[in-house]
Image (cartoon, grey):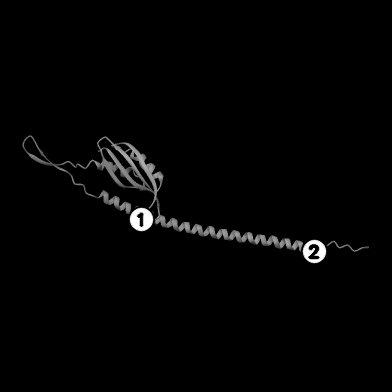
Amino acid sequence: MPNINLLPSESVRRKGLGSIIFLLLIALIWVGVCFWLYRNIQSEIAIADKEYSIKKEEIASLEKELTGLNEQLSSTAVEEEIVIVERKNGSVKKESLGVYPEIFPLLSGLSSAMPQGAWVTKVETKNGICLVEGYAFKTQDISDFLRNARGIDGVTKAKLIETKREVFPNRKIPLHHFQFELTLGGGVS
């Protein structure tokens, strides 16, 4: 009876071993690429976190500075106007009318209409028109400010003139410069 060998021959075993080594090599390369991507993504996240914390600190310092300026503005004493009144009986009396310039109600209204992410750098009034310029972190802040400004007493119309994207000097914080016009009526001129 002839001998029949049912075990795979040596060449078949070598081919199987070669394909296993090839698959292991591909898997090892795949793991290396995944590890490399993971490390790069982690480093990008770390850089973004640092930038975020730096910008957050800068915003906090700007808010602190803004709060100080607002406190300084609110604590500024306004002199009251003293009027001498002569009565019918001939007596003279000094009265304090507490008259403030007519722009104060508008400034008060602007400060209450201003969202947290916006601030005004310039206010000019002339012939019943008030030109307001400032900066905001987001365009939504500008939109909110303009919408709120329409509700200020004495303002009959609010119109956006210009917005443009700028970078805050020396800090590289993106800002939006805005300029809008308020038409005044009803006591403010």
Location of residue 60 (image quadrant):
bottom left
| Camera sees residue 46 | yes
Q: Which residue is mark 1?
A: 61
> In percent of the image, x 66 and y 60: which residue is there?
27
Who is closer to the viewer here, 125 or 115?
125
Quadrant where the C terminus sits is top left
Dot label at residue 16: none
Location of residue 149 (image quadrant):
top left
Q: Which residue is mark 2?
A: 11
Label 2 sits on a secondary structure element that is helix
Q: Is residue 142 left or right of residue 78?
A: right
State whether residue 50 is above or below residue 151: below
> In percent of the image, x 69 and y 60: which residue is there?
23
- Mark 1: give few (<14), some (14-19) or many (20+) Cα within 10 Å: few
From the top left corner, tell me how far across and down residue 171 is, in percent: 38, 56
Which comes sooner in the sequence, label 1 or label 2? 2
Quadrant where the N terminus sits is bottom right
Label 1 sits on a secondary structure element that is helix
